[in-house]
Image (cartoon, rainbow, N blue to C red):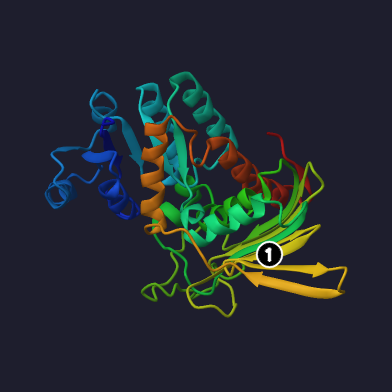
Amino acid sequence: MSKILKVGIIGVGGISNTHLPGWKASPHAEIVAGCDLREDILPDWGKEHDVKKLTNDPSDLFNDPDIDIIDVCVPNMYHAPLSIAALEAGKHVICEKPLAPKPSDIQKMIDARNKSGKLLMTAQHFRFQGNSKAMKAEIDQGTLGDIYHARSWMIRRWAIPTGSGFILKKNSGGGPCIDIGVHILDLTLWFMGNPNPVAVSGVAAAPLAKQDGSFTGWGHSEIPKEFDVEDYAAAFVRFENGATLVLEVSWLMHHRTTGEDMQMWLYGTKAGCHWPKCEFLWDDKENKSFEEKELKNFPETLEAHAQECIEFAQAIVDGAPSPVPPEQSKQVMSILDGIYQSQSAGKEVRIDQ
């Protein structure tokens, strides 16, 4: 029987709650420690999840020889230093998205991973949905041919998070680009086979959030005046293989949607497809007809946040590669960082990876 991997979680509120069911469901993992700056919440959290080791100092987890995995669930700006420290201490690391706001910080994480010999994974949960797995498998069979263009968007009508971890650039690194754009962009690049991006022309601005009286639909509270990130962004991306991508993201846009509208179209030389519907469209040149099909049989998975934790533990046990390697996250963040650079320069910018 394989060793049970001991898991320590840094940041026990918020997003970590979606990871807990995965660690508990995994036959290879056990949560043994929790760390959070808010000491007052730790006793109840520990009692609820039967975790005895509780601390407000991450180094207590890094220095514990019994802990195998560190799960980083803290604000964006702390992802890199905590992940690097954990890797240097010989721990495997799964870190919430974005892996880091800056590509240069991700490279430092990759360097630490390489020196440690441990696994580093970005928690990009949309990859672990059944429909995503089914569509990726179909694409990898060559159904689309060569993918030459993609359109992706993730748009909310009224859902700006108002916490300082999201709306202050010093904490988050950016607005919806970093918060939700990272999701649809990661998924798109994964389906495309992660081509190398070479140039971005983009806009990142806040035309609505800074208006007097602007509010979020979450609690209908007004958006804080200190808001200093974008509320929408759009970009045109060119890749080394000649492919192109149009990307749109927003927290606050007069767009008809309930919750958020997250969609993608991929266009190839043989066929096109749509996510999340998993529709494939192509032409039959011999019969001069247009054909289509919709994938129906999806792999059974847990909720995607939980599934990613299960698959990370399984990869460690199997000696397999990281399910979401940091090199792919560096591609994602190079594009998003390129949008900000293009906005500042007022022109297309080259991406230097």
Horizontal and vertical percent position of residue 343: 70, 52
Q: Amino acid at mark 1?
A: Cys
On screen, residue 86 versus residue 207, left or right, reads left
Does residue 229 show up? no
Residue 141 vertical placement versus 67 (above, below) = below
Q: Which residue is mark 1?
A: 273
> Which of the two residues, 204 or 138, is positioned nearer the viewer here?
138
Quick one: which residue is furthest to the front in this view?
A: 286
Q: How many marks?
A: 1
Q: Quadrant of residue 337?
A: top right
Horizontal and vertical percent position of residue 53: 16, 36
Q: Quadrant of the N terminus?
A: top left
Q: Residue at x 43, y 21 (%)?
A: 116
Residue 28 vertical placement versus 208 (above, below) = above
Q: Residue at x 82, y 47 (%)?
A: 242
Horizontal and vertical percent position of residue 165: 41, 52
Q: Quadrant of the C terminus?
A: top right
Mark 1 element type: strand
Does residue 200 show up? yes
On screen, residue 305 versus residue 60, left or right, reads right
Q: Residue at x 22, y 46 (%)?
A: 38
Residue 318 vertical placement versus 295 (above, below) = above
Q: Dot 1 surroundings within 10 Å: few (below 14), some, or many (20 or more)?
A: many
Horizontal and vertical percent position of residue 39: 18, 44
